[in-house]
Image: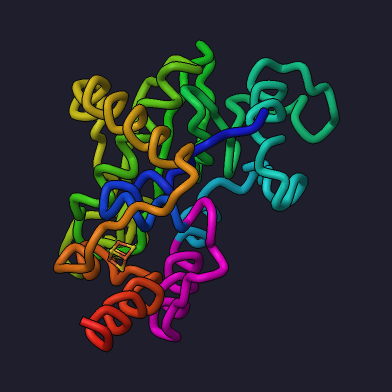
Amino acid sequence: MTHLLSKSKYIRGLQCERALWLDVHEPRLARYTAEQMRRFDRGRDFEYAFKAQFPDGIDLSAELGRSVDLYSARTAQLLDGIDQSPLTSHLSPLTLFEAGFQYDDVLVLADVVCQREDGSLDIYEVKSGTTLSDTYRRDAALQHYVISHCRRIHSFSIVYNGVDGENGVNGQGGRFMIIDLTVEFAAEGDRIAANIAEMKTIVRATAEPDTPTGQHCLTPYACPYQHHCQQGVRQLSLFG
Ligand code: SF4
């Protein structure tokens, strides 16, 4: 099943409609700094450390790789018990890594999904930052919106990188801080649906939006299309 938006594109769209359009139509124009790439790697290391707390977890990315449009169907097979392979038959509850869910043309891959005996899900979104930022909340709220239209959610939590002195879990020296935001996210459905509708219109447009550069190019993330957008500014100043 194909999709129009993903979690990362949604967050990009909240920052700038032009960046969203470029992400979909001209992603080759993105330029990431070495520090941004290192930050991605640190985030992955933290995520792997949390997933190691679930030794029976099944990693869909190991089976499906970059074929993202296959994830939601495969996830449904596993959660519905259709898969009878020795890999899953002894597992109860079932734990999936990178489980895919699609609704409203949005595909999300959830870091850790644990299926309870009654079929409902405990979901953990892993973030390597040391504070619970608004961007983390918006990202996870989108996932809650999509998944709640596909399955019954028992709990939805963000896991972040606790600092010394905070109480953590699993004797990890306070490292994995788990905050249950199920109630907060359940109240955000209407706003998220409106955002998605607006972003789908942007993505379907054939012309690049002419959004001017400004402070939003740096917040909450340094936009990877600054070089592209500033080219236009330089040309204007040359001939203006
Ligand atoms: S550089 Fe600024 S205007 Fe251009 S796409 Fe990025 S956020 Fe938008």
Where is residue 191, by image quadrant?
A: top left
Residues drawn in magenta: 23-46
Residue 38, x across and y down, in percent: 45, 80
Residue at (50% x, 65% y) in the render: 44
Q: Main secondary structure of the magenta part?
A: helix
Query: How many numbered dots are placed on residues in this image?
Result: 0
Where is residue 228, by image quadrant?
A: bottom left
Residue 209, x across and y down, in percent: 34, 52
Residue 110, x across and y down, in percent: 49, 40
Q: Is residue 39 magenta?
A: yes
The quarter of the image that holds ligand 1 is bottom left
Residue 66 higher or lower than 140, as above or below: below
* Closer to the camera in the image, 48 or 143: 143
Q: Does the magenta stretch include residue 204?
A: no
Residue 113 higher or lower than 125, as above or below: above
Q: Which residue lies furthest to the right in this view?
A: 85
* Closer to the camera in the image, 138 or 48: 138
Residue at (58% x, 43% y) in the render: 97
* Closer to the camera in the image, 174 or 127: 127
Does 40 sit left or right of 161 as displayed? right
